[in-house]
Image: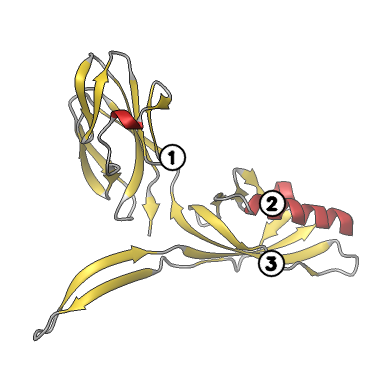
Amino acid sequence: MQNDFYIGGVGSGEFGVRLLSDYTVGGTPLTRSRQKLPGVQGWLPLATEYGLRSIKLPVHLAAKSPRAAAEQKSRLDAAFAAEPVELYLPNGFYYTASLESAGEAQELSDDGCLLECTYTLLGYAHDPLETVTIPAGGGTLYARGTAPEMACRLTCTVGAAAAIYTMAGVTWWNVAAGDVLVLDDLERRVLRGGGNDFANTNLITWPKLTPGENTLTAPDAVTVEYYPIWL
């Protein structure tokens, strides 16, 4: 059976299901707060919050027996229930999503071997992980995507020992030549040589990428990893 979509890197054919053509991916909801300015025709923007897209995936599931159909439905439910679940859909986008409903299975055949159900999720659209290297001393990275801010992972290897070492605005103290430093906003961790080193930095705010040009500085070359996110 062909793969219409992927769940956690596994093709839908492995679950014996076909995605129906009327699947839907909603737009990104937006909530804004404003303060009306007294005496004038205008307002003061206060905040903008982006929500998650609604994703509805109707599928047909075929098996050789009602028991096999129930087992396949259970395996599919478990795959969708991963938190979060990574999807790849026929529209060419990846989605990081969270299952809202697995849906009740409806029998489409008298023998109970053909089922239909709809999975409902909330999530956001993105492309595969991109990797860019910034040269020693700093440089400019052009970030793809349309989200106002995108998390990233920054990695560098210290070239020379230093009492103070600053990468992308975050300072480490007392680093040695060869230390591998990682600012990982994708998994919310700070590492030195693979171990937790959060307490040895002045990190308050994670470095973020914005669409378009971003300038990053560090004494040594920095590897930048990020997912372009699309509103």
Residue 123 in the figure: left or right of residue 183: right
* Quarter occupied by residue 112: bottom right
Ranked by sequence position, the earlier of labels 3 and 1 is 3
Label 2 residue SS: helix
Q: Which residue is mark 1?
A: 187
Q: Which residue is mark 3?
A: 103
Residue 224 in the figure: left or right of residue 25: left
Instruction: State the quadrant of the C terminus.
Output: bottom left
Question: What residue is rendered at 41% in x and 65% in y?
Answer: 28
Image coords of residue 10 (percent x, y):
64, 44
Image coords of residue 52 (percent x, y):
45, 62
Front residue (pair 89, 187): 187
Mark 3 vs mark 1: in front: 1
User: Is 91 rendered above or below residue 37?
Assistant: above
Ranked by sequence position, the earlier of labels 3 and 2 is 2
The amino acid type of the residue labelled 3 equals Gly
Image coords of residue 176 (percent x, y):
28, 14
Front residue (pair 21, 110): 110
Marks 3/2: CA–CA distance: 13 Å
The amino acid type of the residue labelled 2 equals Ala
Ranked by sequence position, the earlier of labels 1 and 2 is 2
- The answer to whether one can see residue 223 in this image is no
The amino acid type of the residue labelled 1 equals Glu
Mark 1 vs mark 2: in front: 1
* Quarter occupied by residue 60: bottom right
Label 1 residue SS: loop
Q: Residues within 10 Å of mark 2 (few under 14, many from 20)?
A: few
**Residue 207: mark in rendering:** none
